[in-house]
Image: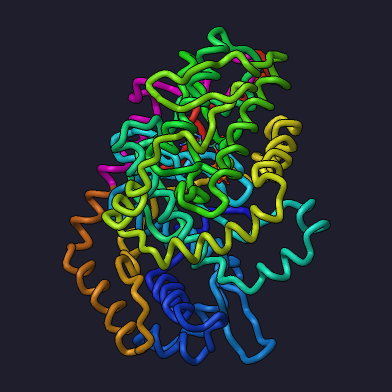
Amino acid sequence: MKLDVDVLRYLSKDDFRVLTAVEMGMRNHEIVPTELIDRIASLKHGGTYKVMKNLLKHKLLHHDASKYDGFRLTYLGYDFLAIKTMVNRGVFMAVGRQIGVGKESDIFEVATEDGRVLAMKLHRLGRVSFRAVKSKRDYLKHRSSYNWLYLSRLAALKEFSFMKALEEHGFPVPNAVDCNRHCVIMSLVQGYPLVQVKQLSNLEMVFETIIGLVVRLAEHGLIHCDFNEFNIMIDDDEKVTMIDFPQMVSVSHRNAQMYFDRDVECIFKFFRKRFNISFEGSTDDIEGSEVDIDENGRPCFSSVAKNVGFLDKELAASGFTRKEDEDIKKFIEDGTDSDAHSGDEGNEILENVSNFEGASIRDIDSLHLHKQDGMCEIEETQENSEACGSCESETQNEIDKEEDSHNGIENDELSKRLYKQRRRAVAAANGGRKKTHASRNSYKDKGGRSSHSSKIQKQLSIW
Ligand code: ADP
Ligand code: MG
């Protein structure tokens, strides 16, 4: 799916009002009846139908008349709502190129007002590789009954909450900046996924650090469950950062031992294949840990001093509820239990991307956000309104409230602010930024494919 953020600048306040109305309707309708959208949006001069036609044209809505006449949001529509909310919150102000394609996510660079570059992960649960489409019809049939937007939102919230908690406990993870709907904003890791790395000068040290992470996680009550070369980033100093947390489980999970062993095995297998080195039997202890090592050099799950309380405590504090955890777990387990390893599908997709030398990335298009005069018309939509409410007048009030609070800002003042922001961002893009990311994700620097690390200054379009 193509995320053409350019369209954003053509969207009016009414477009967003209707888009928000559909989102609200989707709290209790898979397909929102057209009349209900009209009532929730309650545009002052009517015209909801015309607006819906426009949203349909830009693929922000999907029309479904199979049971009754209605609409649902597409991922693109959901992307726009999340992006607009984040921009209105001041989290970032421009979207750059796509830097990652996950199994069920897209990752983009975004720029803040002061020229810092962050990573934006848009969760896309329900997207599967062609291999899965071919070989897992039953699995798909089962999964089609899920509400993808809801699950993507949960995945984002879970990822954000875990990232924050892990960061607070000193784990090497990106800094969790913000989260809205299915979108997570985090710091950009200055490194390469381990899968792209062809040589390491401190091979043994990196290996031990990575295995040490699996053990330390378990000591904190957690198992990553997708701990592989795609979810471990290495920088030029060979510092390790782990990413990708929506599938993490507690060590009290019924399959915890299997997940733990699988994570460990994945790392042993990768190092054996990639670096032709076997660490079997070579590890006799893990620094800073009391864990027992078996005769093959693997840490024993049963001997990990687990602190089960960690997960519940931290996540309760972060707002990720047990019910939400159950919902997402149900979905993820349906997926991972039927996969040999959930990472494998992702591997296939990413290998395709690498083989095409970035062609897939280019096909998806770099994103362009430009300053638009009508920017001030884009109000914050439905923020903090995730609680389920079936009353449509209530939702109407919500929209009205948000509009009122927005209208409190003088348009003039806002235009001035936007103009200033844009000038600052253009200055930053033209070289004001101290550090570029020219070597990030570049195979060349690590002995792999040649670099296509075009400078973000050129790629970023400024809103
Ligand atoms: P998925 O859950 O779909 O597998 P990931 O979180 O693993 O998504 O991200 C996919 C890819 O995007 C990663 O392999 C990595 O190359 C890139 N990526 C993800 N997060 C970041 C980040 N914070 N900084 C830099 N690159 C990232
Ligand atoms: Mg991943």
Q: Is residue 74 above or below residue 280?
A: below
In percent of the image, x 69 and y 38: which residue is there?
Answer: 347
Q: Is residue 285 above or below residue 376?
A: above
Asked if residue 260 lies in the magenta stretch, the reply is no
**Residue 348 shows in this picture:** yes
Main SS, magenta region, reads helix
Q: Is residue 416 above or below residue 96?
A: below
Rendering quarter of residue 148: bottom right
- Find residue 52 and report its horizontal and vertical position in percent: 53, 78
Q: Residue furthest right?
A: 134
In percent of the image, x 52 and y 50: which residue is there?
Answer: 247
In percent of the image, x 39 and y 54: which residue is there?
Answer: 372
- Magenta residues span 419-446
Q: Is residue 455 above or below residue 37?
A: above
- Most foreground residue, 48 or 289: 289
Asked if residue 433 lies in the magenta stretch, the reply is yes
- Find residue 74 and report its horizontal and vertical position in percent: 57, 67
- Most foreground residue, 330 or 167: 330
- Find residue 287 and report its horizontal and vertical position in percent: 42, 18
- Find residue 253 and report its horizontal and vertical position in percent: 50, 53
**Quadrant where the N terminus is found in the figure:** bottom right
**Residue 80 shows in this picture:** no
